[in-house]
Image (cartoon, rainbow, N blue to C red):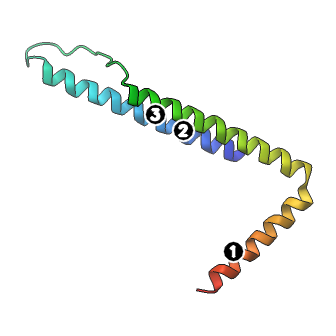
């Protein structure tokens, strides 16, 4: 469950950065197009197809990751002993692979 909240926070952070970048770009283009004496008015630029596609992909990634973590949590809750044993085997395998270097 904590992985879901971390992932959700990271995606919100990315969306915030994307929105800030769009606002900054809109402000720069407004300043470049208007004469210096005119008052800059806030304008929202229409979303480009690439931005819309990126936003849709981020939403899809968030929903897929959330579904994956929910599924994993259900499986671990249903089979705790097998999950611990599997994690132990994976840890041993990784330790041996790293130890060979």
Quarter of the figure with the N terminus: top right
Q: Nearer the viewer, mark 2 or mark 3?
A: 3
Answer above or below: position of 75 versus 47: below
Q: On the rendered structure, is 38 left or right of 62?
A: left
Residue located at (68% from left, 39% from top): 66
CA–CA distance between discs 2 and 1?
A: 29 Å
Mark 3 element type: helix
Q: Which residue is mark 2?
A: 11
Q: Residue at x 34, y 33 (%)?
A: 21
Residue 81: image location, x then y, percent? 91, 61
The residue that appears at 85% across and 63% down in the rendered structure is: 84
Residue 27: x and y in percent read 25, 25
Label for residue 54? 3
| Label 2, label 3: how far apart the Cα atoms are | 12 Å
Residue 13 is labelled as none
Q: Which of 37/10 is in front?
A: 10
Q: Secondary structure at mark 2?
A: helix
Q: Residues within 10 Å of mark 2 (few under 14, many from 20)?
A: some
x, y percentage for residue 86? 82, 65
Mark 1 or mark 3: whose residue is earlier in sequence: 3
* Residues packed near mark 3 inside 10 Å, few (<14), some (14 to 19) or many (20 plus): few
Outermost bottom residue: 100
* Cα distance between the residues tagged 1 and 3: 35 Å
Residue designated by label 1:
94
Quarter of the rendering occupied by the C terminus: bottom right
- The number of numbered discs placed on residues in the rendered structure image is 3
């Amino acid at each position: 469950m904590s992985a879901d909240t971390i992932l959700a926070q990271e995606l919100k952070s990315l969306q915030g950065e994307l929105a800030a970048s769009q606002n900054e770009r809109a402000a720069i283009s407004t300043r470049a197009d208007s004469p210096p004496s005119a008052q800059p008015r806030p304008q929202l630029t229409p979303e480009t197809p690439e931005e819309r596609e990126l936003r849709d992909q981020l939403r899809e990634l968030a929903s897929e990751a959330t579904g994956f973590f929910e599924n994993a949590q259900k499986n671990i809750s249903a089979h705790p002993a097998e999950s611990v044993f599997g994690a132990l085997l994976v840890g041993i395998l990784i330790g041996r692979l790293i130890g060979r270097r």
